[in-house]
């Protein structure tokens, strides 16, 4: 493992909410390029907070290094965050606008129509450009949310409970989608089937600390 490129290095990561309760308690971890790392733990163990810190969405103590550099706004386009609730990432009047938002915001060149079309195809919702996000099923919203990330081709994917709330059919489809995505993936989940099918390594988070890690594939 040590011969592989370190994509993310986390050094003494700590985070406390306003009530001063420490949620993350000095996490040290290396995540390797193109690795799929799954994080499990009970509710309240700090899984979502951990992902939000890596994404730069919370102000934390310690260091998060992306390709050896401390996190800053210029690195944000390398990271895609899939929220547990897709409504947290869908806010435009049409699907096209939501999926186009990332490329526009990051100043991407190229044919925006083709970028949106390609992202929707990869996410399994081709032809949804004119659909209204609010009217989609929960599973469709999940896929469109994924497309909003894929549209700017991030190198790191942070997925918070990606299969939670999906029907059995949608869940199977979504697991296949995630498995086929390229890049470094960190997934917070309770879905044992998801863990077994796509994880290279599993981290158990307990009360803000890494309690255990297990390699599922010979990396």
Image (cartoon, rainbow, N blue to C red):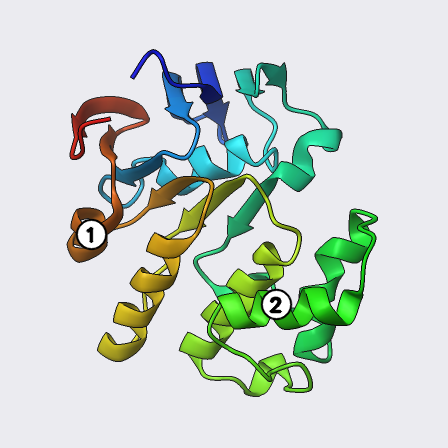
Q: Quadrant of residue 77?
A: top right
On the question of residue 87 being in view, the answer is no
Depth check, front residue: 18 or 177? 177
The residue at the point 32 percent across, 36 percent down is 37
Q: Which mark is residue 215?
A: none
Q: Secondary structure at mark 2?
A: helix
Q: Looking at the image, which residue is at 29% across and 22% down?
A: 209
Give percent across and percent down for residue 174: 35, 66
Using the image, determine if residue 209 lies above or below residue 176: above
Instruction: Give how far apart the Cα atoms at labels 1 and 2 are.
Output: 25 Å
Question: Which residue is more in the foreground, 200 or 52?
Answer: 200
124 to 8, vertically: above or below: below
* Residue drawn at the location 59% of the way across and 65% of the way down: 119
Q: Position of residue 10 (x, y in %)?
A: 46, 18
Position of residue 148 in the picture relative to residue 45 (left or right): right
Q: Position of residue 2 (x, y in %)?
A: 33, 11
Horizontally, is 52 left or right of 138 in the view? right
Lower sequence index among marks 1 and 2: 2
Q: Is residue 85 above or below residue 1?
A: below
Would you name the residue on which mark 1 appears? Answer: 197
Q: Quadrant of the C terminus?
A: top left
Which residue position holds label 2?
A: 118
Q: What is the crowding at mark 2: few (fewer than 14 residues within 10 Å), some, or many (at least 20)?
A: some
């Amino acid at each position: 493992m040590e011969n592989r490129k370190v994509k993310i290095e986390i050094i003494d990561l700590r985070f406390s909410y306003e009530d001063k309760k420490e949620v993350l308690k000095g996490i040290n971890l290396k995540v390797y390029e193109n690795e799929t790392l799954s994080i499990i733990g009970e509710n309240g163990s700090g899984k979502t907070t951990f992902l939000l810190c890596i994404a730069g969405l919370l102000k934390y103590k310690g260091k998060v290094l992306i390709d050896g550099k401390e996190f800053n706004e210029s690195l944000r386009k390398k990271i895609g965050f899939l929220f547990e609730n897709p409504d947290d990432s869908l806010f435009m009047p049409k699907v096209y606008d939501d999926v186009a938002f990332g490329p526009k915001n990051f100043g991407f060149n190229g044919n925006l129509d083709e970028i949106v079309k390609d992202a929707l195809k990869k996410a399994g919702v081709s032809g949804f450009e004119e659909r209204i996000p609010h009217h989609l099923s929960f599973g469709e919203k999940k896929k469109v949310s994924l497309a909003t990330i894929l549209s700017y081709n991030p190198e790191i994917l942070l997925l918070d409970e990606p299969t939670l709330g999906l029907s059995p059919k949608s869940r199977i489809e979504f697991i296949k989608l995630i498995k086929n995505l390229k890049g470094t993936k960190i997934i917070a989940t309770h879905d044992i089937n998801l863990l077994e099918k796509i994880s290279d390594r599993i981290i158990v988070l307990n009360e803000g600390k890494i309690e255990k890690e297990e390699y599922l594939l010979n990396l």
